[in-house]
Image: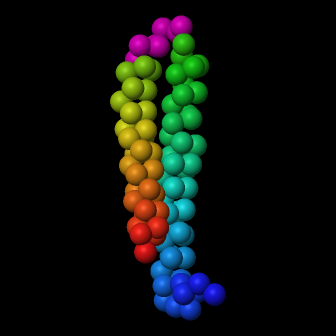
Amino acid sequence: VPRIFDDSHALAGIAAGVFSAGLVYVIGVFVTTAAANVPLNNRLVAAEGGKDADAVWEHYLVRWTYWNTTRAIACGATLIICLDLLAR
């Protein structure tokens, strides 16, 4: 039996880390995509060729970039948590 399974505290710490990584990823990437980026994309498509297309684009560019950066940070945080788990 690998030594890691002999130490319940280490195993609990790894489980907490895996849970944390999953939570950060699900909230930071999936929820952000579904709640922010997809609706922005849909509004942009709906405005294509319309009178207010330029205004929609300006709004889209600022908001989408913000939420995409949020997703990138969440991915980076998930990576850091996973790398920490691998280093244990």
* Image coordinates for residue 21, horizontal then vertical, percent: 49, 63
- Res. 23 in view: yes
Q: Residue furthest right?
A: 1
Is 3 located above or below residue 23 in the figure? Answer: below
User: In front here: 83 or 74?
Assistant: 83
User: The magenta stretch spans which residues?
Assistant: 49-55
Quadrant the C terminus occupies: bottom left
Residue 18 drawn above or below residue 51: below
The N terminus: image quadrant: bottom right
Asked if the magenta segment contains residue 50, the reply would be yes
Residue at 48%, 85% in the rendered image: 10
Q: Residue at x 50, y 40 (%)?
A: 36
The number of callouts visible is: 0
Q: Which residue is at 46% across, 67% downward?
A: 86
Q: Residue at x 48, y 8 (%)?
A: 51
Colour mapping: rainbow
58 in the magenta segment = no
Quarter residue 35 falls in: top right
Q: Position of residue 12 (x, y in %)?
A: 52, 83
Relative side of 34 to 17, left or right? right
Please provide percent x and percent y for residue 80: 40, 59
Residue 84, position as x, y percentages in the image:
41, 67
Q: Is residue 8 visible?
A: no
Q: Nearer the viewer, residue 29 or 81?
A: 81
Q: Nearer the viewer, residue 14 or 49?
A: 14
Q: Is the residue 65 above or below the residue 72 in the image?
A: above
Residue in front for this viewpoint, 30 or 75: 75
